[in-house]
Image: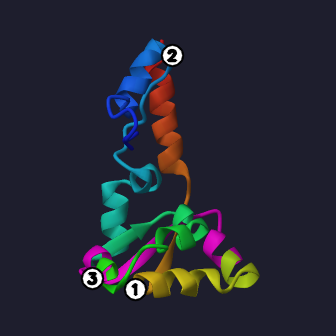
Amino acid sequence: MMNLNAPERTIDAILAEYGDRVVRLQAGNCVEFLADADARRDIAAGREVYWLTPGWLKYRKAVFRYFDESHKTEAFGRYETAVLLCPLGMFDDLAVNNPETIPDLADGMELNIEPAPIELTRLQTLLDEARKSLP
């Protein structure tokens, strides 16, 4: 993400300031931290899927604060469903303990949300690869 007050301070610029003491994980976004392209292809089963991570549930009110109908259509209109990459049984826990959370997000997106239970093995693999590349 870009800091608008200092656009030259990209994540790569910040990492460079730390030299070889840090390494960037090899994933393009938060979804790729949890599931690689093959796993997502299998989960999607040919459908147009909008991928969600648990943060969407936590920050749903902030995400939709400034959305109107045209924003929803532009952002989500081409998708058939939303899939929550769900580590650690979070979806089931929310369904029992905070049942309004999931429908609230689904209403904001105007999409059904389905859970895709996942292990954190993809994230562990990325962390292991990063650790190996450190001096």
In what quadrant of the picture does the N terminus appear? top left
Judge whether 130 appears above or below 44 on screen. above
Q: Is residue 11 left or right of residue 100?
A: left
**Residue under the image location 57 percent in, 66 percent down:** 59
Q: Which mark is residue 111?
A: 1
Q: Quadrant of residue 8?
A: top left
Mark 3–mark 1 Cα distance, whole angstroms, equals 9 Å
**x then y, percent, for residue 71:** 31, 77
**x then y, percent, for residue 12:** 35, 28
Q: Nearer the viewer, residue 1 or 83?
A: 1
Q: Going from the N terminus, do you reach mark 1 or mark 2 first?
A: 2
Circle 2 packing at 10 Å, graded few (<14), some (14-19), many (20+), is: few
Q: Identify residue for label 2.
A: 21
Three-letter amino acid code of the residue under disc 1: Leu
Q: Identify residue for label 3.
A: 77
Give the residues in magenta.
Answer: 73-93
